[in-house]
Image (cartoon, coloured by chain):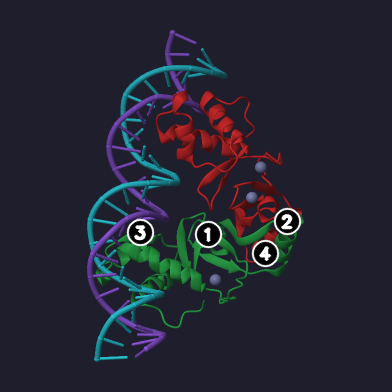
Chain colours: A red, B green, C cyan, D purple
DNA sequence: GCAATTGATGTAATAACATTACATTAAGGA
DNA sequence: TCCTTAATGTAATGTTATTACATCAATTGC
């Protein structure tokens, strides 16, 4: 699932996210890329879909927005569970990959014979900088 | 935050969710309540907002949908962290409230001076019934 | 009881997020 | 080259959520 090389659209979307200070919605990305020839939402959504598959972009479900991965964790087929801490004030997102959480959730799921395909963990709150 | 008594709209929305076999979107609820006088999305969203505050309805972020609470946990001001196991096949949602998860996430947050306001944990997958 | 306040409701319009459908083009392999 | 697959362009549409404003109901203070 690791990409050999990104397509032009994928590279542009990734670059936009990488330079952003906070999660971006698909439409915000679209607006930022109009100068580069983007005209329609689908151009963004298609790139995001691939980048997310590759594991180098994450979707934040509680925000309907996307961030570039800052935490080069396991990009392989068996993706690690990632918890996101999202600051409501500055938009900073930190990624936490913790085996204990992962194991515990796995145990709880197994206990009720639930086969987990994808796990979302998002903490909304205030980061250290914004709390000070 | 516990309600003394639900308003008519709140009661109707809650009843709809209670009788549903799977999470419902706001617009699905709206359609089901047209016979009872509902005409506009806001009637549903306003009721959902209150019911969610009361802790008797939960919003599933990864689904943009809502479920009635089935797990009479802490409805007080300090809400417990709840993990949801959501079956992609039958829509069944089970609620898991686990202190270990809660403590671990709390520790990880504190470690980076993050003040958590709200935590979302959602596992998407296949329940025991649908795996068999 | 009655004014003042607060919370809930009704309605329309619009904003924000995401997908379907279909035509076209680019890339890679037999 | 021919065939297949992946990516792209574009328009239209579908889905989810909010803003704005008028009205109505319940509660409180007098
Ligand atoms: Zn990451
Ligand atoms: Zn911050
Ligand atoms: Zn619950
Ligand atoms: Zn199931």
Q: Please give the label number shown on residue A108.
A: 4
Disc 1, SS? strand
Disc 3, SS? helix
Q: Quadrant of ligand 3?
A: bottom right
The residue marked by circle 3 belongs to what chain? Answer: B
Q: Which residue is mark 3?
A: B27
Q: Which residue is mark 2?
A: B113
The image quarter containing residue A19 is top right
Q: Which residue is mark 1?
A: B87
Q: Is residue A40 above or below residue B90?
A: above
- For label 2, count other residues whose C-alpha is less than 10 Å away and answer few (under 14), some (14-19) or many (20+): some
Q: Is residue C30 above or below residue B28?
A: above
- Would you say the beta carbon of the disc 1 residue lies within 8 angstroms of ligand 4? yes
- For label 4, count other residues whose C-alpha is less than 10 Å away and answer few (under 14), some (14-19) or many (20+): some
Mark 3 → mark 1, Cα distance in angstroms: 21 Å
> Are discs 1 and 4 both within one chain?
no
Q: Position of residue A81 (x, y in %)?
A: 67, 50
Q: Position of residue A120 (x, y in %)?
A: 60, 53
């Amino acid at each position: 699932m690791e990409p050999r090389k990104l397509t032009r659209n994928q590279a542009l979307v990734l670059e936009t996210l990488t330079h952003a200070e906070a999660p971006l919605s698909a439409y915000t990305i679209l607006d930022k890329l109009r100068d580069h020839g983007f005209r329609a939402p689908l151009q963004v959504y298609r790139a995001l879909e691939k980048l997310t598959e590759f594991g180098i972009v994450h979707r934040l479900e509680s925000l309907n927005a996307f961030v570039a991965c800052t935490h080069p964790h396991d990009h392989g087929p068996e993706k690690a569970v990632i918890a996101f801490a999202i600051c409501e004030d500055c938009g900073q997102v930190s990624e936490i990959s913790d085996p204990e959480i992962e194991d515990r959730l796995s145990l709880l799921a197994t206990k009720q014979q639930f086969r987990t395909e994808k796990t979302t963990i998002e903490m909304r709150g205030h980061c250290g900088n914004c709390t000070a």
